[in-house]
Every structure is written in structure tokens, then in C-alpha cells.
Image: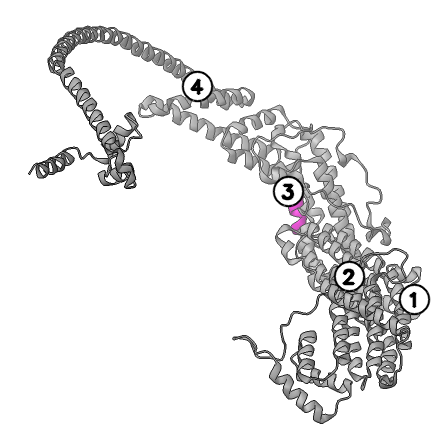
Amino acid sequence: MMEEEEFEFAEDLEAILHLTPEVQLAIEQVFPSQDPLDRADFNAVEYINTLFPTEQSLANIDDVVNKIRLKIRRLDDNIRTVVRGQTNVGQDGRQALEEAQIAIQQLFGKIKDIKDKAEKSEQMVKEITRDIKQLDHAKRHLTTSITTLNHLHMLVGGVDSLEAMTRKRQYGEVANLLQGVVNVLEHFHKYMGIPQIRQLSERVKAAQSELGTQILADFEEAFPSQGSKRPGGPSNVLRDACLVANVLDPRIKQEIIKKFIRQHLSEYLVLFQENQDVAWLDKIDRRYAWIKRQLLDYEEKYGRMFPEEWCMTERIAVEFCHITRAELAKVMRTRAKEIEVKLLLFAIQRTTNFEGLLAKRFTGCTLTDVPGQKRPDSPLDPTNPFLEDEPGEEAGTEKDEDLTKPKKPKAPDNPFHGIVSKCFEPHLYVYIESQDKNLGELIDRFVADFRAQGPPKAGTEEGGAVLPSCADLFVYYKKCMVQCSQLSTGEPMIALTTIFQKFLREYAWKILSGNLVQRVHHVNSFIHSLEEKLKEKVDKVLVERINLTGEMDTFSTVISNSIQLLVQDLDAACDPALTAMSKMPWQSVEHVGDQSPYVTSIIMHIKQNVPIIRDNLASTRKYFTQFCIKFTNSFIPKFINHLFRCKPISMVGAEQLLLDTHSLKTVLLDLPSIGSQVLRKAPASYTKIVVKGMTRAEMILKVVMAPHEPPVVFVDNYIKLLADGNPETFQKILDMKGLKRSEQSSMLELFRQRLPTPPSGADGGPSLSFSTPTPEQESSRIRKLEKLIKKRL
């Protein structure tokens, strides 16, 4: 019974002492302990087993029990001390709470007193600031009233004076007064509901309208639309009237400018009517000479009449340009059949020169009508370029050959470019057709000269240079491009580009096709430069339409064909030697000697031709590399095909062929630098092709040298060395070994059986993916074979 009670007590105690993980963690942080009895997951059985791991350890059970009992008594004493120490805590806490409540009440009373005093102070501040605000409002209203009354006094007086001065045409005083009246009237916009203010505003508008009408009438009287101009210089009245027009509606200013310019250019329209002889292109200089005189006459007589910011000189020149462009376009449409290339170029040259003079003299501000922009130079500046005489202004004194000389390119910031010369664009087809004809004749002359002189010999200084016709062609192209860019940067440049493309193709096929690669390469670089220059000259919106890629591809095709011709030439030189190789009696060879005569012949042809080709392609190394690669790709398969024709072959004959193959392999590896004093490592891509191709030839001969008995070993050795699943290749090997047809049949059947099964998803073709020996391994094998041959010799 006692044990049961103790067990129940332990369970109750465990339930009471069960703490949450958070509390347990807090206890462990405050009172860290390594004692197993303090752990939350304490297990009594494990603890006892720890104390008594073996039966022999039970001999100390009494000591352990005594220690535990001593520890329990100490814990009981500590608990008792703590419990007794908490006896008076409740009473002390209540007393402290009462003292705190009393202190809070006292603090609340003090805070209330402070709040009451703050409210009283705030009320006093409000009363003080209310009075100050009233004073501020009164002051502001008084100031506004005084200012408004002053403005009203100024407005009433100004309107009366404005009306009186208008009637007397005192424009100098009106210009200053009107601006002031308008500025003052702006202060009364919010008072327009007052009848008196509205009446003053209407009087100002009426005065402005009257001034505009009156000034226009004065200008009409001074510069009538019909009849001759008023003699003498401008009056001060008109100069002051222009100042007034600056303040009036902008339409008044525009009307004055329009009427004055129209009257100033009326004589021009009469002198250069469409039916007049001076209206044609050959007299175009007279148009520009006339406007120069008129501008000089204007600056002398009327330069000080108009305000400087009106830029009247520039406006007259711009209006002249607009009229001239329209008149020239009209007369050229009427007499289009009379337009010749030289006449057109003459007119364009004179026109672009005139546009250049305009750019030197004016800023172009009137082209966009930027308000308030002033001229940087005085209208009476003695450096006016119109004062400079141009030699040979008459068309008759201009030499024909000077018309085709390229002029300096126009400045990119010339705002007047095309203001007149734009009218020539619809007729530039005459120039384009002329260039088409000239280029056709030039190409024909190049062809005739080339046929007469014959192609320069390779290896000579002449053979390595650029063809003279090539240089002439691109100089002519540059000349045409510069001329056309000065005539137009729009559609005519696209048409000229089309002409260039046409004759580039003709030059490629008629002259360069079959010639040395180096020359074609130079032409290709010229084309790229030409394309970049055309894109610089043409309008930005048309840049995408300039594309000479097709022509460069054409020349690249010529290069490729030229390289192929060189390859075929060297290939053909080696064909007799390969034929001699296939006809030699390899079965009767009794001993292995030096390289065979056919190898010596092939090496001789290579040493004779390759250095010459390399020297001619010295500046275009990549094309020489292409030549080497193409020759190797052509020669090695041909060599292997002739190797298959050498049948039957004895063991000694196969060894001789293997030695010959190694000699050719060495020569091919040195092909890029053969006969050169400067030793240069061959490109890795080329070396890879040679090693791969010639290694296959060596493997073929090794298979031929291997005994065909037992057949299984022979077939496996073939598959391992050649990795070729084509039965035709295997049969060629058997033919080289001189086996009979009956033996070949069994071998072929065994070969088909021993072929590895292709992986799933493969196409099941005859090709195999065996790992071929590395070049290092093959080189090692070749060295061993050479040692063997030397021993036998």
C-alpha cells in the first residue's frame, strides 16, 4: 500500500510540475544547469542505469542513496527558507501600492493646474493676435487701394495721351507709352466687371486697332504695291512705327514685313519672267547677282528703319530663295528636254555656292521664326560676303572641265542647304543617266585594256599590286558620290547607289573573275569603304536603303572561284604522279627504300607553286589559309582513292606506301610555310584536317599489312583502326590484299556479323562512331614503323 501511495504521489507531483516549453526554456536560461535531475525530460530509469551500469556497481548503492537523501534535505531546507521569506511580501506590496496611488493623485493635481494656466495663456495670445491680424488686413487693403488708384490714374492718363499721340502720329512716344498702358491694364483684369474699367479697356483696344490700321496705311503710302518706290530714304516716322508694331498684334508686324518684301522683290518677278532669256539656267548667275545688289541697296537705305530683331535682310533673302525655287522648277518643267548634264551641274554649283554665302551671312533664324533671336552681326557690317566679287560669274567664262571638279562638301550645319537647290532634284535623273553611260564606257575601256595587256604574271611586283582599273574605278565613284551628295542627299543618292552596284558586279565578272585573289580582296575593302561613305552622305532616313552586301558577296564569290582555280591548277599538276602511283607493281616490290619517285614529283610541284601563291597573298593571309585548306581537302581524298587502286600489294609494298604516305603527310603539314625563310606555325584548323585525312590513309595501309588469318582477328582489327562500317571500303581493302572472291565472300559475311549494333534511335547507316587513335599515338606508331624499316634496310 505504501508503494502504491508513493507512486500516485509521484504521478500527481509530475502532473503539477509539468511546465510549458517556453517556461522551461526561460528557466534554463536564468538557471543553467548540467544536472540530469534538472532536465525537463528527466527519466528515472535511465538515470538509475547511469548510476549502476553493472551488477558490481550495486555494491555502492548505500553511498548513492545517502548522497541523494542529503541532497533532498538540502533542497527541503532551501524551499523552507524561501517560503518563510515570502511571508511578509504581501503586506509590503500593499503598502507600496497605497503610497504609489497617493503620489499619482498628487501628480494629477499638479498637471490639472498646469493645464488650466496653459488655457488661460492661449486665450490671451488669441486676443492679442486677433488685433494684429486686423491691423495687417487693414494695411494690406490700404496698400492695395493706393496701388490700384495709382494704376487707375496712370491708365486714365495713359489712354488719353495714347489717343492724342495716335492722332498726331507721334509713334516714338506711342511705342513707349503703349507698352506701359498694356502692362498697367493687366492689373485690372479682375476688375473688368466695373463699367468704367471695361470702358478703359475698350478704349485701349480701339487705340491699338487704330494704330495698326494707321501704320499699315503709312507703309502703303511710302511703299505702294503698284508704281515706283518712294524716292529718298526712310523717314523717322516709319522707324518709330515699326517700334509700335512690335507692341501691337503680331499680325500687324507680319503684314508690314510681307508687304515690304513683296514690293522689294516685285522687280525680280518682272525681270526674270519665264519667257525671258535670263530666266534659263545658263543665266542663273544673274539672279544671284541681282539679289546681292538689292540686299546691299536695302542695307544702305532701309537698314536702320526696321528693328534689328526683325532680321529683314535675311527675310528678303529667304523669300527670294522661295520665289527662285518655284520659278526655276516651273521653267525646268517647261524646258525639260533642253536640260543637259553640264548645264545642270553649272546651275547647281552656282546655287550651292549662293546657299553657302547665305550661311556665312545669316543665322537662319527666320526659317523657323524664333521670336526674339537677334542677328550677331550688324546689318551694316563691312564684312558682308555679298560685297565680295566672284570671278567668272557669267556662264560663258566658265570652262566645261571645271564643272566636273568636286567641290568642298557642304557644312552640315548650313540651314540654307537645299532652300533653292531642292528644285533640281526632280531633274537629277539626267545626271544619274549620264553617270550610268560614263561608267558603262569606263568598264568597256577597262575590259579592252585588260584584254590588250593581258593579266599580270603572278609573283611579279605588278601581279601583286592592285589593278590600275580598280583604282580608277573607285576614284571615279568617289567623285560621283561627292558631286551627288552636293546635289541631293535624298532619292538621287539611292539611284546612284544602284548604278554603283550594277557596275561593281560587271567589274567583278568581266575583269576580276579568274584574276588573283589579292586584287579582289582590295576591291572588297573598297566596296566596304564606299558603303560607309554613301551612308554618311545620304539622309538619315535613307541610310537603311544603302546596302552593298550583295556586291561584296559577288566579289567574295570571285575570290572563292579564284582560290578554287588555284587549287585545281596545283591539283592537276599532282594528278600524273598519283596515276603513276596507282600503276606501280606494288606486289613485286622486294625492299623498302627512300620515298618513291611519284612522291618526289608531288613535292616538287608543291614547292614550285605554293611559295608563289603565298607571296602574292602575303597581305591577305586568310585567303592563303583557305587555299591550303581547300587543296588539302581535295588532295587527300584523291590520294586515298588512288591508294585503293594499288592492288594487289605485298607486305613490303605496303610498307613502302606507308613510308610514302608519311612523307606526304609531313609535306602537307609544312605546306603553309614551305619554301619560306620565316617559319610560321600552321593554323590549328588546317593541321587538324591534314592529320585526320592522312591518318586514315595510314590506317588503310596498316590494315593491308595485317595478316588475314584468323579472319575474326583481321575483321576486328579493321573495325578498330578504320571505324568504317561501309562494306565497299572493306572490300577495297580485301582487293588490295589480293584475296580471291571466295575468300572475300566469307570475309564480308563475317564483317557484317561483327559490326556493332547501332544505338537505339540511330539511322542505322554504315558509319560507325569508334574512337580513332589520337595524332600522338599515330605519330608514335609511325616512328616505330620507321625504326623497323631502318632495321630491315
Quadrant (top left, top right, bottom left, bottom right) of the N terminus: top left
Q: Which residue is drawn at 13% across and 16% down?
A: 84
Foreground residue, 315 or 32? 32
Using a 10 Å C-alpha cutoff, classify the residue at mark 4 as few (fewer than 14 neighbours), some (14 to 19) or many (20 or more): some
Confirm or deny contact between disc 2 and disc 4 (CB under 8 A).
no
Spot occupied by residue 11 in the image (x, y as percentages of width and height): 13, 38
Residue that mark 2 sits on: 435
Residue that mark 3 sits on: 319
Residue that mark 1 sits on: 457
Residue type at numbered disc 4: Asp
Q: Which residue is drawn at 17% across and 23% down?
A: 76
Confirm or deny contact between disc 1 and disc 2 (CB under 8 A).
no
Of badges 3 and 4, the one in the foreground is 3
Earlier in the chain: of badge 3 and badge 2, it is: 3
Residue type at numbered disc 2: Gln
Tell me: residue 698, above or below residue 185.
below
Which SS class for mark 2?
Answer: helix
Residue type at numbered disc 1: Lys
The answer, for residue 775, to whether it is visible in the render is yes
Using a 10 Å C-alpha cutoff, classify the residue at mark 1 as few (fewer than 14 neighbours), some (14 to 19) or many (20 or more): few
Of badges 4 and 1, the one in the foreground is 1
Question: How far apart in space, not on screen, are marks 3 and 1 (Cα)?
Answer: 64 Å
Of badges 2 and 4, the one in the foreground is 2
Q: Residue at x 91, y 63 (%)?
A: 459
